[in-house]
Amino acid sequence: MSDQVISIIALVLIFALATFSAVHLGVLAIVAAFIVGSTVANESSDDIFSGFPGDLFVVLVGVTLLFGIAKSNGTVDWLVNAAVKAVRGRIALIPWVMFLVTAVLTAVGAVTPAAVGIVAPIGLGFAVAYGISPVLMGLFIANGASAGGFSPIGVFGSITNNVVERNDLPGSPATLFTASFLFNVGLCVIIFLLFGGRQLLGRIATSGGKGADDGATAPASLRLDLPRALTLLGLLSLVAGALFFDLDVGLMALTISVVLTLAAPKSAKGAVDKCAWSTVLLVCGIVTYVSQMERLGTIDWLGERVASIDAPLLGALLICLIGAVVSAFASTTGMLGALIPLAVPFLLTGQVGAVGLITALAISASIVDASPFSTSGALVTANTPPDQRDLVFRRLMAWGLGIAVVGPLVTWCLFVVPGSL
């Protein structure tokens, strides 16, 4: 049995044990990386630790710490009230506003973790304040990031278009961006209908409660005091640093958190306890194991098996499926750079359209980012109130695994099959 097959079997066992026992999934993944690395891959401890996503750890801790401070000093509540006034209290519009804000951020060049890290805590603050499903809100934000990410100047779009150009493949940046944006809009319409959006129609929010039709009374107006003003300035600095200076969002969030704590110690009290440590361990553990699978060549091995298939259409579908499933547990950016070259053998036959397959692959690999094992889904889960976190995690996991299967099939039918007829 090859090392690659063993690593896949171990991954299946990890999820099976986590499902039917009380062992934490992140701990299981790290233990699996230790066992497989020591017995199969002949890896040292340093090799195993090299797969630990330190950057993702800092992003998750930094962002949840910063917004823990923002929640403690009332800044999140102030933002919620201000935004509700901007949409004239129409609660059903709030998730769409969050979708568009996140899409704009990624479309102008923000990396997905930065955009989601900025918007998710605010959007989930809306969800808590106005009775919106946190699953609905989280999916809108994650899909917004994917919708904007494939613009010609977006990170996903730049990577995809550059890989296409380097491999001398025909491409269409405009088609890629338009198709991705519209697909995510359509996906959000389905999400809106599935996760309680219809119950939001017609509801008008009061100035900070659950909505006028819920019988809630509006609290006193929130005042923009010094700690809140400093926090808003910190949030704006986070946006500016991510968009214009390409600074790491996690390191910036930690820095801003330190400054706010020094400036207003009382309002930051207990913020560290609000970091979603269980989610951080879970996501970092899974990514550590998936990184080991990449070092073992498991992903390349799967791609080679697909490339050996004589039926180009079937091979194209399998590549989209692999991209979706792996991206749900790993870096979408990495998948875009690795899987497009694997599609070259199919494209050279002329039986599969290059633009269609690249578009289908790009969308398939990005719409699974709401999985709690991916950065976007992890940020959504981490910023969900503790009493709803387990439910949101399970719903996002079910959604991510489901869309990893359904998404590639739909994009294949829409973009690949017509180009081969």
Image (cartoon, rainbow, N blue to C red):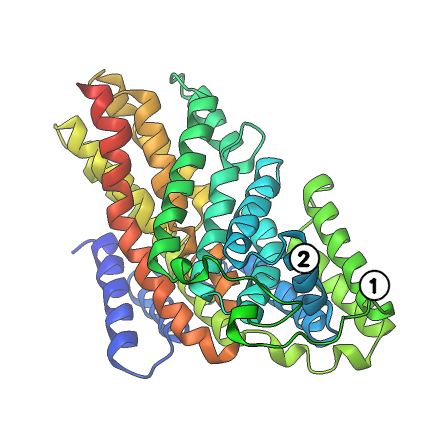
Q: Secondary structure at mark 1?
A: helix
Residue under the image location 23 percent in, 15 percent down: 350
Instruction: Point out residue 289 in the picture as x, y percentages from the top left corner.
Output: 38, 61
What's the CA distance linking mark 1 and mark 2?
22 Å
Q: Is 65 situated left or right of 317 in this image?
A: right
Which quadrant of the view contains residue 178?
top left
Instruction: Point out residue 302 in the picture as x, y percentages from the top left corner.
Output: 24, 44
Residue under the image location 67 percent in, 52 percent down: 86
The amino acid type of the residue labelled 1 equals Leu
| Image quadrant where one finds the C terminus | top left
Q: Earlier in the sequence, mark 1 or mark 2?
A: 2
Q: Is 345 situated left or right of 309 in this image?
A: right
| Image quadrant where one finds the N terminus | bottom left
The circle on residue 85 is 2
Q: Is 98 situated left or right of 282 in this image?
A: right
In front: 95, or 344? 95
The amino acid type of the residue labelled 2 equals Lys
In front: 300, or 397? 397
Report which residue position mark 1 lands on. Answer: 230
Is residue 197 in view? Answer: yes
Instruction: Point out residue 308 in the picture as x, y percentages from the top left corner.
Output: 17, 32
Kindly give the residue lying farthest to the left in the view shown.
310
The circle on residue 398 is none
Q: Does 79 appear above or below 273? A: above
